[in-house]
Image (cartoon, helix red, strand yellow):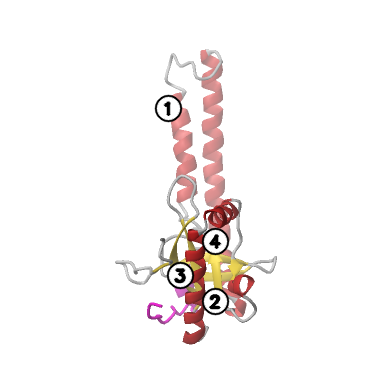
Amino acid sequence: MPPRRPAPDLSDPAEFAARVKLRSPRWQGPALLAGLALFCLVYSMVPGDSTLPLSADGRRLVLLLLAGAFAVAAATVLWWDLRTRAGAYRRAHADFLDCGTVAQGYLTSLDVGHEEYRPAWVLIDSRVPDEQAARLYAAFDTWIDAVLADPKLRRRVVIWFRTGGETVPSESVFGADATGGFLVGPQLRGHWKLLLPTAGGKWKVHPVLSADPSGEPVPTLGSGA
């Protein structure tokens, strides 16, 4: 098992807000919707197109209505985010202090993507002792190699992930003594993950941005053989 690192301290609300990715960047959604609005507006001025089975005036009207709808949607999404983002981070930080945790992420060689390579991840709670972490790492490493060696089992696991597989605690795979680990679907690349409880008693994973602008290497678990 690669050497473990000290987990980032997210107890400070400002540090939590700066490093935890709960949502996409504020302008991402509005910018996409505004781009669609602009596209429809420009496209409405292009004559002689037969994509829509309408008259020239009807086609122009439909595209202008779509442009207006996308523009309104962009403004609405931005307004909603401005009103709710700070509260969402406050609630998430309170949940983290109450019963959340930071886990060390390990990229695996188990590809669960459809049209592109998208590996599954193993997460190990940063609070578990080194001996338990090493046992979890070895257990997942052996299990992933066994899955990769069995085409039928691998296909079943991949299908399960593609149909919305949940975050699976390690004790569900290896037994009651194997607490502190998780098997999860594809994640943004990064060394640390935040685990927050959900209303259904499960876990939701959020990336923790690295303090090192050069990026942190992520160990790969499983030989891929």
Residue tagged by mark 3?
Answer: 105
* Segment tinted magenta in the rendering: 1-20
Q: Which badge, 1 or 4, is on the more N-terminal residue? A: 1
Q: Does residue 16 belong to the magenta stretch? A: yes
User: What residue is drawn where x is 31% and y is 67%?
Assistant: 213
Within 10 Å of disc 4 (Cα), the crowding (few <14, some 14-19, many 20+) is some
Disc 1 target residue: 42
Q: Earlier in the sequence, mark 3 or mark 1?
A: 1
Distance in Å between CA atoms under marks 2 and 4: 21 Å
Question: What type is the residue that disc 1 sits on?
Answer: Val
Disc number lying in front (3 or 2): 3
The residue to which callout 4 is attached is: 85
Q: Are marks 3 and 2 in contact (CB under 8 Å)?
A: no
Disc 2 crowd rating (10 Å Cα; few below 14, some 14-19, many 20+) is: some
Q: Is residue 202 left or right of residue 68?
A: right
Query: Quick one: SS at disc 3?
Result: strand
**What is the spatial separation of the Cα atoms under label 3 and label 1, in whole angstroms?**
45 Å
- Circle 2 residue: 101
Q: Quadrant of the C terminus?
A: bottom left
Mark 2 or 4: in front is: 2
**Cα gap from disc 4 to disc 3, whole angstroms:** 26 Å
Q: Nearer the viewer, residue 19 or 214?
A: 214
Q: CA distance from mark 1 to mark 4?
A: 33 Å
Total tally of numbered discs in the picture: 4
Q: Estimate the spatial distance between the alpha carbons at disc 1 and disc 2, rounded to whole Å.
A: 48 Å
Q: Amino acid at mark 2?
A: Thr
| Helix, strand or loop under label 4 | helix
Location of residue 217 (image quadrant):
bottom left
Residue type indicated by callout 4: Arg
Q: Is residue 205 magenta?
A: no
Q: Nearer the viewer, residue 77 or 215?
A: 215
